[in-house]
Amino acid sequence: MSSGPVQRRLRAALITAAAAVTAAALTAAAPAASVSASPTSPAAATGSGFTPAIGTHPHYVSAGRPESTGNGQVKFACQLRTAQFCYGPDQIRAAYDIQALLDKGVTGKGRTIVIVDAFNPPNVQQELDTFTTTWGLPKANLTVVNPFGAGYDPSDPNQSGWAVEISLDVEWSHVVAPDAKLVLVTAKTNSDADIQDAIDYAVDHRLGDVVSQSFGEDERCLARDILVRSHATYARGTAKRMTFTASSGDDGSAQPTCDGSGYSLAASTPANDPLNLAVGGTQLFADLTSGAYRSETTWNESLTYGAAGGGGFSTIFRKPWYQVGVVPGRFRGEPDVAYNAAIDGGVLTYVDVLSADVPTGWYRVGGTSAGAPQWAALVALGAQLAHHSLGLVNDSIYLAARVRSVQNYLFHDITTGNNTYTVLDDEGNPTGQVVPGYAAKPGWDAATGFGSPKANHVVPFLAATN
């Protein structure tokens, strides 16, 4: 279904005007715009299972114990070195101009972030309490919803990997929107059908304003019936003014093949759906104490950790109207936006998943799965400013950021690096397979989208235009 040329022109005029006065958030909603892009049949679809981005590679590295350094919120040795470094809440808040919003009382109060993950580890609240106490954050309001009876086996590496994902998602969405409510919806397993059941539940019960999804797989692996069902669910949620964020994957321009035998050029689902805000990856370079922003490049640690920011072009979803004139070709391009995802430069996360494979403690964690919940939290901040849920935000972003000066006002435009993926073997050595990727460049690109947020600008903009 299309919104029609008249409505699009009205919406474009609204967004152009709002970009000039984005500091003043409007209280009335802009006209809704739907996306005229529906799925075509996958080239090959076999029932598979979603993977958390941090579950397939060593995307978390021990950070040791917190130390008293005398530097306020600098507590770990990795916050003091230039190699294998890490960031805490203060540094990320400063680098992306989030703190300026928090200082104005824009904290996500009255809004709810829904996080969809798989399995049901028992220690999520305790982990979150340790995290908030360590960093001096307010106590989080977390509700765990387990509608399908998910269990947890800590001896299963797949399940403990998902448990680390949950730790990352709840802790770092709370960093960005400390007064927003958090609702964790646990799928029974990470099968495609079970994950879809959890998303359906979140939408049908309208559990919150925005839904974060930190998982993915090759879009061609999703069975046709689940693909159609998934897009219909996002359409229902969008009609309810819910926003969806999705990580774009951690294998650069590639995805694991459906049979697990290798890698091929592919877009990740659910980030490929035009009704999702697809979040790619960068490597952030900020002052390790103050967090002052210095620079960013495309996240590509495929030679060191076997990981890089996902991005590319769908072969299933045609290009939505909002990407016309911005994205080349005939199909949906991803990501739309980006966020720090590097492992060297990872975010400090407390993990207690009861697994011998993942000892309890602090880790520096990377992956585009760090960006999806933090972008969801930014949407929650915008919803607080707007006094209502924002719904689809992709259209307003594309209509505004296609103007280069507006893009540079709202985003850090990433213009260096690429997401070419070098495949490593189990010993960490290159196999010889290299999947060519996409280079970052001025404007939108298939490595980092429009770039990472200047939150003090982009949040009021989203509130004003949605």
Image (cartoon, grey):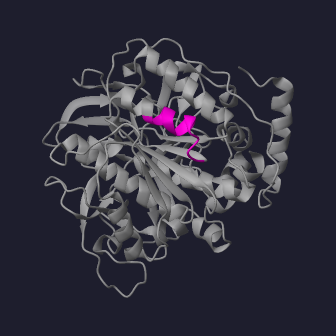
Q: Is residue 321 visible?
A: yes
Residue 413 to residue 456: above or below? above
Residue 63 x/y as whole percent: 26, 66
Between 196 and 214, the one nearer to me in the picture: 196
Between 286 and 378, the one nearer to me in the picture: 378
Residue extent of the magenta highlight = 198-208
| 121 lies left or right of 267 | left
Residue 375 x/y as whole percent: 54, 51
Q: Quadrant of the C terminus?
A: top right
Q: Quadrant of residue 319?
A: top right
Residue 356 x/y as whole percent: 13, 55
Residue 248 x/y as whole percent: 45, 38
Main SS of the magenta part reads: helix
Q: Is residue 57 visible?
A: no
Q: Residue at x 37, y 15 (%)?
A: 45
Q: How many marks?
A: 0
Q: Residue at x 34, y 75 (%)?
A: 80
Residue 121 to residue 392: above or below? below
Q: Quadrant of the N terminus?
A: top right
* 326 falls in the magenta region: no
Q: Residue at x 74, y 54 (%)?
A: 386
| 212 lies left or right of 104 | left
Name of the residue lying farthest toward the bottom? 70
| 118 lies left or right of 104 | left
* 202 falls in the magenta region: yes
